[in-house]
């Protein structure tokens, strides 16, 4: 099939990093992250391109995509893995924490998909995979803000998939179960789930969707639920 170009937002840790690791052996990979030291560490480890980008900033997202396109001319697939954890009762969450979760999980996802589709439409093909959460499919006490922001992303993907009118541009979503990544640790929370999917396992499915060919039929808009025993 030849080497392709993939952009992984949130690719410095967790699922995003696992996706980048799977892709980099055979493809060109650009990793986006908002912490410069982490971006540098991943690019050194994988030998890929790294771009410092806070996805909650439209200007930074636009510039990041422009940098990748300027280097490689095309983008074959985009994995939207960037996310901020917001666990706990609404009453216990600070306004700053709520705002950041909305900025990254809702606005950031919107900016990523907006820019991704701009470039994919220009070239006439490509895949987008949004990483949601199993919690979207069933209400779970204790994570109202996180679930609401991921539900926003799921709804956005569904509408965008219907709007493409061509399966050459596929907009898909995958909802993994709880994964013991740094998502919770970054905000000072502990990972409490006893049943979970490993990031390396879920990454295989993300990569499969990213590599679907333009003429593979009937998958745009697909919602993949990776059942892991929790529900």
Image (tube, rainbow, N blue to C red):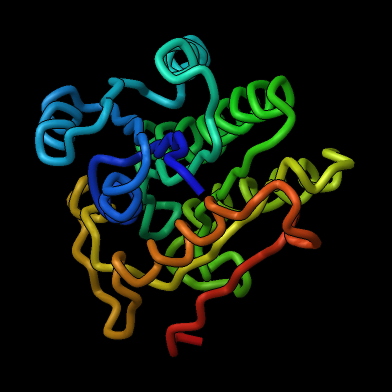
Q: Nearer the viewer, residue 8 or 98?
A: 8
- x and y percent of residue 206 in the render? 47, 58
Which percent across, then down, holds residue 83?
40, 44
Please, is residue 109 above or below residue 119 in the view?
below
User: Against 201, is 189 above or below?
Assistant: above
Residue 196 occupies which quadrant of the picture?
A: bottom left
Residue 23 horizontal side relative to residue 145, left or right? left
Check the image and name the residue furthest to the right: 165
Q: Residue at x 51, y 76 (%)?
A: 226
Is residue 218 or residue 32 the one in the foreground? 218
Q: Position of residue 184 (x, y in %)?
A: 26, 55
Query: Could you tell whether 174 is left or right of 4 in the image?
Result: right
In the image, taking residue 121 as reference, residue 133 lies left or right, namely left
Residue occupying the point 45% across, 34% down = 5
| Number of callouts | 0
Residue pictured at 46% horizontal, 38% vertical: 4
Query: Residue 174 location in percent, x, y?
Result: 55, 62
């Amino acid at each position: 099939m030849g080497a392709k170009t993939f952009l992984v937002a949130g690719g410095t840790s967790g699922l995003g990093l696992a996706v980048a690791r799977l892709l980099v052996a055979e493809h060109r990979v650009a990793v986006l992250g908002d912490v410069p030291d982490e971006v540098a560490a991943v690019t050194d480890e994988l030998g890929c391109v790294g771009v410092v980008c806070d996805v909650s900033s439209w200007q930074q997202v636009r510039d990041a995509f422009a940098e990748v396109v300027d280097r490689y001319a095309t983008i074959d697939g985009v994995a939207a893995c960037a996310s901020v954890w917001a666990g706990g009762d609404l009453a216990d969450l600070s306004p700053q924490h709520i705002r950041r979760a909305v900025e990254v999980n809702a606005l950031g996802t919107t900016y990523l998909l907006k820019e991704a589709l701009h470039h994919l439409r220009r070239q006439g093909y490509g895949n987008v995979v949004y990483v949601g959460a199993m919690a979207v499919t069933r209400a779970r006490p204790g994570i109202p803000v996180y679930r609401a922001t991921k539900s926003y992303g799921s709804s956005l993907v569904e509408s965008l998939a219907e709007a493409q009118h061509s399966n050459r541009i596929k907009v898909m979503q995958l909802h993994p179960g709880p994964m013991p990544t740094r998502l919770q640790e970054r905000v000072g929370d502990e990972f409490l789930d006893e049943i979970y999917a490993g990031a390396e396992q879920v990454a295989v499915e993300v990569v499969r969707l990213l590599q679907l060919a333009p003429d593979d039929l009937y998958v745009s808009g697909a919602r993949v639920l990776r059942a892991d025993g929790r529900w």
